[in-house]
Every structure is written in C-alpha cells, then in structure tokens.
Image: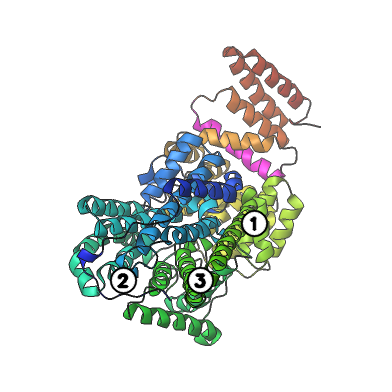
Amino acid sequence: MIAEAADVTDQEVQPRPASGPATSKVVVIMLLVGLFAYFNSLHGAYILDDARYLADPNIDSPLRAEMATRPLFMASLTLNHRLDGFHHRGYHLFNLSVHLLAAFTLFDLLRRTLVLPRFAGRFDTSSGWIALVISMLWLSHPLNTQAVTYMVQRCESMMGLFFLLAMWCFLRGATGTRKFWWYSAMMMSCLAAAGCKEVIAMFPPLALLYDRMFISGSWRAALRARGGLLAAACIPCFAPVLALAIIGFFTDKVGTVGFGVKLFTPYTYALTQTEVILYYIQLSFYPKGLCLDYIDWPVRHSLAECWPSALMLLTLLGIMGYGVVKNRAWAFPMAWFFVILAPTSSFLPIQDAVFEHRMYLPLIGIITLVTLGVVAALRFVVDRVPASRGMLYRTAGVSAVCLITLLAFRTVVRNSDYGSATKMYADNVEKRPANPRARHNLAMALFTSGDIAGANHHIDVLATVPLQIPSLRVDQIRVLRENGRTAEALALAQRLYSDDPNLEGATYELGVSLLTEDRPAEAVVYLEKAVASFPDNRTGRTHLGIALIAAGREGDGMRELRIAQGLDPTYAKQLLQVARRTALKPDAKPSALKLVTLYADAACRMIENPNADARDTYGICLARIGRFSEAAVQADQAEALARQGGDSYHADRIHYRAELYRAGKAYPHE
C-alpha cells in the first residue's frame, strides 16, 4: 500500500530532494525511446480530418479558420503550413516533439510529487526511477499513437502538454519560492491549453484535489491556501466550453457534439459510455486491435443492454469515491482517469462515442496506479523477506525495460498503419467491417490510387451497411459519382432529398448529380438552395455558375463565378490544376472528364485574361470528351499567347497537341 499521512500545513510541504537518474540522462533516454517508437510516424499519411483542416482556405489566418475556437491548435497548423506546405514530415515532427515534452513534464511532475511530505520519505530514494518508468511506459504506449500520429489530434496532445505544465507549475508554486511567477506560468499554461481543446476545464477540480491530497491535507486548508487561485484559473479553463455552447452546443445543425447529436440522447450516451470506458481500460492493459474509427459502436438504449458494464463502472467509481473521502493517495490516479474522461465519456453526447486519442491523459492515471501498486507489492515482500531485495528489484527493473521495449515495438507496428490512407482504412474495415465511414474512406482511397474495382466493391458493400450517420449517404453519392456511376449517384441523391430535404449536403449533391447528368436547368433549382444556405462556399457557387451558364443564363452564371473567385483569388488556378491533373490520366472516368471540362471553362471565365496554361488545359479537357474542334481553337489561342510571351518550347508542345486535336486524337492518346 502507498503510505498515507495526516493533514499537513503549508510550512510542511517543502519537498525533499528527488533522487534517481540525472535529468540529462532522462532527456537522452526519452529521446531515444521516443524516436524509436515514432520514427516511422514521420511518414504518416493525412487521414480523416487532416485533409479537411489543411484545405481550409483560412489556414494561414487561425482566428478565421474553421477551428477558430481552438486558436493555438490552428496557429500550430499555420506555422507548419508556412514552413512545410503540405509535406507530412514537418507536421508529424511537431506532434512528436509535443509528445516528448509532455513525457518529460510528466516525469518531473511525478518525481516531485513522490518526495512531498505526504509520502513520509517512502520514495526519497526511488522517486526518480519510479517517475521514469511511468513516463516511459506512457511515452511508448501504442494507445497514444492516435493522439501523436493522427496529425490533427495534436489538439489533444498539445492540450495534454499544457495541462501537465499547469499542474507542474501549480506544484512548484505551492512548494517553492517565487509563487507569483509559478502561478502566473500556471495561468498561461491553462490559457494555452484552452486554445487547444476544451478538456482543460477539468484542471481546476483536479488541481484542488491534488492540493488537498498531497499538499494541504484537507479541503479547508486547500481552499484557504489556493482556492482563489483555482477559481481564477476557471476563467481560461472554462472559456472554450463557453465558446462551444455559444456556437451551437445545444442547437448545432451538424450534430457532431452537444445536444444536437442525432445518434444519442444524454441517457443513451451515458449508457453507451459504460462499455466504452471499460474498453479504454482494456486497451490500456492489452493494446491489441487499435482502430481509427468506431462510428459503428453499438448504441445502448436501456440499462438491460449494458448492466454488467454499468455495475462494474459504478463499482470502480465507488472505490474511487471511498478513496477520495478517506484521502487515500491511490484515489488520485483513479480520479485523474475519470475526471479527465468526463467531458467526452459521461452524458454530454458526441457523435463519435469512441476515439482512442481521448485516452492521452487518462492513460497516465492507469499506468501510475498499476506501477505504484507493483512498487507497494515489492516493498511488502522485501519488508518480510529482506534477502530477496536485490533479486526482486533487479527483476522489476529488467521487466520494466522489457515492457517498455515491447510497447515501443507495438507502437512502431501501429504507426506503420498510418503509412498510407489506403492501409489505414483497410485496417479499419478489417477490424470493424460494419463501419460505413471506414468503407467510404477506403473506397475513396482506392479510387484515388487507381484501384477502381476495389473501390466499387466497397461502394456496393456500403449500400448494405447500416448507417449511424445519415450524412454518410451524402458521402456515398460523391463516391458513386467520382467512380463514374452517375446514374446511381443521381438516384440515391433524389431518394435522400425526398426522405429529408433538410439533411446537410443532400440538396447540394442532388444539384451536382443533375449537372453531371446534363440536366443543368433542374440542377440550378437545387444549387440555388444550397448556395442560399452556405453563401461563402466557393465550390457551391462555382457549380451554380456552371449550371446557370449551361442553362442559358450566362449573365447570372458569370456573376456567381465572379463571387466564387472573389471568395478566394487563387480558386481559378486551383480548378485548372484539378482539371489538368484529371484530364492527363489515361484511365479517367468520362463523368470526371466531363466535370473537369466544366471546371476548366469556369476557370477561364473567372480569369479576366486567361494565359497560355489556362487555354491549354481547357483544350486538353475538351479533347478528352471528344470536342476536338473546340479543343483545337483553345490550343491555337494558347500557342499564340505562349509565342507572345517568348516561350517557344511551350508553344511548340501546344502546337503538337493542336495537330492531334485536328486529327481527332486526344492528349494523352494511344
């Protein structure tokens, strides 16, 4: 058992000198283990929300970006984007650096905690080694890979780093001199964490419990000594929660978090979390079967469906409650686990009931509790059989090294799944075959890589899989259309719109599907509705402009295209890049070629004086859909512009293409 102590006063909380490995050695060991466990994460692909946030047109303006409620997180993406563009390595190196800093902060926090008077000197000669083992187990644990290798989940690891820094500064201020500076650093850490994720709201209650258990010894003493400080810390800590409530926590139309979630009610979410929390604990001890996406996790609608897990969870909470009331030190790691999980694993509905990155900080509680339990057991044996001391401690040390090594190897293996989007989504589908979002993402990844047959297989299976989120059918429409199955896409879009006209994306996808099927007049009706709902969507306005022009309303269409270009001055260039890249693929689908031809036409209309590249791209697209005479006209104009600019090499290549078009051949051609 961990030693217990009576209440202590502020004058008695000066910690004893910590023992163990030198700080420089700890840094080197952590760097070596961290780099070994995560070296292959530096090549990790962008998955799920990664591409979404990197494609944000305001990525270089954090306060105007989609995730402006997490400004420090967005600022980190802005920094990476300016330094690295879209290259993976810089983003992943940043994530790994955050994880290493968090592990070292955890080490020093634990080391200093174990030498507090609360423990009556029991850990004075071993605090550094115990802290090193706990922090190394946490550093190398594969359950943390999602928070480290899944690029945008740096919001979790960054929040975790600042959460630990805030607790460390709180301890330094409470037990040392220069209190003003330490407490100021604590407040700054809370503010930084608030700029990353809302879970920082759990810092004030945990810091108060930490104070009561390890420093002041009682609630009254803790509140008297630092109650005002922690009350002030609530301001930055609860600010992101308030912002979340203001932007739609209760009425969010998208329904991804808060009481607008359609998949759960607070009651069903709480019931479901009884199983989820036990699953998290299982993964902490046996991290096999790690998975990216759990959207298909079964919803529990009654207590009868989950009473065993509910009973077990209530038992654990009861044990923790007893420990807190009796001021037992072992209760703090349990409270750390449950309190930090509370925002995502209680009764407040979130669309995704399970995400492994949510265990980033709670995992510390489990590792700490188990490690100190092992230490207590070893001491129990040594106290009764002193001769076994050397053998037991050597065995424990070797076992710790072996376990850390094993976890690091498992982390390397798990990081290899992040090597490509296709590999990650295939792993997800293998582990959870009924997951519709995983199948959708796998189909898109296979299509992008050129495996059309594989993509079509998963599209067909997707149609038979139960949907947790209706909007996934909207994604399915897009997948069908991009795979050339435009008639099926239109039929599904019509059915989806008929079932729920208010479903986000249904109106827009119906309009685009009609446009792809050469029904522009009908497409205009739905695209106008979609643009009215999202007037700042440049893609929506572009499709509306294309449909209006195709329907004979050129003036109205040009107005929409100009607005789209005004929303992003680089948009025409982006459209041309997409069009050229698609048109130069020999195996591009006819539906895709038709659509990018419309994009190239729209881009040329957006630009006041299209250059040679723009005309040339439009000509390549026209030829790919068999409009050779028009393609030749565009090529001739492009050639003339190139020669006017003095680029004879470019002009000669365009001239070659123009001759192909006049001969009825596309480029690329057989």
| Magenta-drawn stretch contains 475 | no
Residue at (45, 77) in percent of width and height: 270
Q: Are marks 2 and 1 in contact (CB under 8 Å)?
A: no
Task: Examine the rendered structure and indicate whether residue 480 appears above or below residue 430.
Answer: above
Residue at (40, 56) in percent of width and height: 19
Q: Amino acid at mark 2?
A: Met
Q: Is residue 142 left or right of residue 241?
A: right
Residue 425: assigned label: 1
Q: Quadrant location of the C terminus?
A: top right
**Magenta range:** 588-608
Q: Is residue 148 left or right of residue 75?
A: right
Q: Is residue 575 left or right of residue 117?
A: right
Pick the front one: 150 or 336 = 336
Q: CA distance from mark 1 to mark 3?
A: 38 Å
Residue at (43, 76) in percent of width and height: 1
Secondary structure under badge 3?
Answer: helix
Residue 213: assigned label: 2
Residue extending farthest to the front is 387
Q: Are marks 3 and 2 in contact (CB under 8 Å)?
A: no
